[in-house]
Image: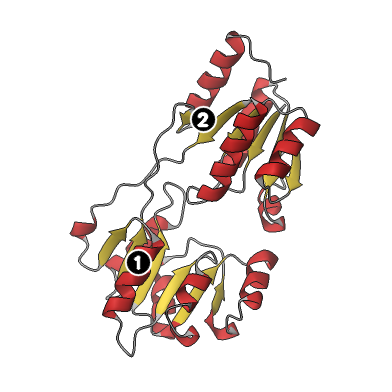
């Protein structure tokens, strides 16, 4: 049995491959919104936010012999959890790496790239002006921004999910500072958001192909808003694949060498 850690658009492709190859599998997502992404996928989908202990228990209970990690490129914590749980259970761990988009930030005057969110926040703090307003994608860094900047300066562009909205409520994000809509957006909508909220700085992630990254870049290129990008710089490990055909080859090779997934 194979467990796919999903929640991204690649999960559908991987599940389709599993069905094509006749391999038994489960899809795991962290939220109910993630599950809705897979409503048309013909396989079992479970909603669970795994810890190392709970993932290890699930592997043992469901007799999982391979985990394919197709979580979000920037979801580094669950990747560490998954790899560690697989090592403990002595099963195969395959990391599905979404192809990266390489951007020459020097070619875009109002764009800079950073390796950590701490670097971004430090830069903003050192350059801040009274009228600065920040548009930040996602909910992960709300606390970090609130430790440095007044709440009225921070606007968060989030997924329209119960999980994200609940987290915003728990962290006391003002309603007018929440923009809940599924990206990517067309250029004019992004530019309208900048103008409506008086945004001076847009903080977003380079999440690779198929993400909102390219539409975010387009918005920066067509505005005077300063773009600050959290880059994706993770090592390509031995059992990593970058596309479906690479995954097919790896699984076939494993089975030819005596591994069994069905």
Farthest residue, direction right: 61
Q: Which residue is rendered at x = 64% and y = 70% of the image? A: 167
Report helix, strand or loop for mark 1.
helix
The foreground one among 8 and 214 is: 8
Q: Is residue 177 left or right of residue 190?
A: right
Question: Which quadrant holds the C terminus?
Answer: top right
- Provide residue 120's location: percent of width, then percent of height: 35, 66
- Provide residue 185's location: percent of width, then percent of height: 47, 65
Q: In which quarter of the image is residue 173?
A: bottom right
Is residue 255 placed above or below 81 in the rendered structure?
above
Q: In the rendered structure, find residue 41 and report the number of the disc placed on it.
A: none
What is the count of numbered marks? 2
Q: In this view, does 107 lie to the left or right of 20?
A: left
Is residue 227 placed above or below 195 in the rendered structure?
above
Q: Is residue 177 left or right of residue 169?
A: left
CB under 8 Å between callouts 2 and 1? no
Q: In which quarter of the image is residue 165?
A: bottom right
Report helix, strand or loop for mark 2.
helix
Q: In the rendered structure, find residue 120 and report the number of the disc placed on it.
A: 1
Q: Which residue is rendered at x = 51% and y = 19% of the image? A: 249
Q: Mark 2 points at which residue?
A: 244
- Provide residue 19's location: percent of width, then percent of height: 68, 27
Q: In which quarter of the image is residue 214?
A: bottom left
Is residue 62 placed above or below 252 in the rendered structure?
below
Q: Which residue is rendered at x = 59% and y = 43% of the image? A: 81
Farthest residue, direction bottom: 130
The foreground one among 126 and 95 is: 126
Question: Which quadrant holds the N terminus?
Answer: top right
* C-alpha span from label 2 to label 1: 34 Å
């Amino acid at each position: 049995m194979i467990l796919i850690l999903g929640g991204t658009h690649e999960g559908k492709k991987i599940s389709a491959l599993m069905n094509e190859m006749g391999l038994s599998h489960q899809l795991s997502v962290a939220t109910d919104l993630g599950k809705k992404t897979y409503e048309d996928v013909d396989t079992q989908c479970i909603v669970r936010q795994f810890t190392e202990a709970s993932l290890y228990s699930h592997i043992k209970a469901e007799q999982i012999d391979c985990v394919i990690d197709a979580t979000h490129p920037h979801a580094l914590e669950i990747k560490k959890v998954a790899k560690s749980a697989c090592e403990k259970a002595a099963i195969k761990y395959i990391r599905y790496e979404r192809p990266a988009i390489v951007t020459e930030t020097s070619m875009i005057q109002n764009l800079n790239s950073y390796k950590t969110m701490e670097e971004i926040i430090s830069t903003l703090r050192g350059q801040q002006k009274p009228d600065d307003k920040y548009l930040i994608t996602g909910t992960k860094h709300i606390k970090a921004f609130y430790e440095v900047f007044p709440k009225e300066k921070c606007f968060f562009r989030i997924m329209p999910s119960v999980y994200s909205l609940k987290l915003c409520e728990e962290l006391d994000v003002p309603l007018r500072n929440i923009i809940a809509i599924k990206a990517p957006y067309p250029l004019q909508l992004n530019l309208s958001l900048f103008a409506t909220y008086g945004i001076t700085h847009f903080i977003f992630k380079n999440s690779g192909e198929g993400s909102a990254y390219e539409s975010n870049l387009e918005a920066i290129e067509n505005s005077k808003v300063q773009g600050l990008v959290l880059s994706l710089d993770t090592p390509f490990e031995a059992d990593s694949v970058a596309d479906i055909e690479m995954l097919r080859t790896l699984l076939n090779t494993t089975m030819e060498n005596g591994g069994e997934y069905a």
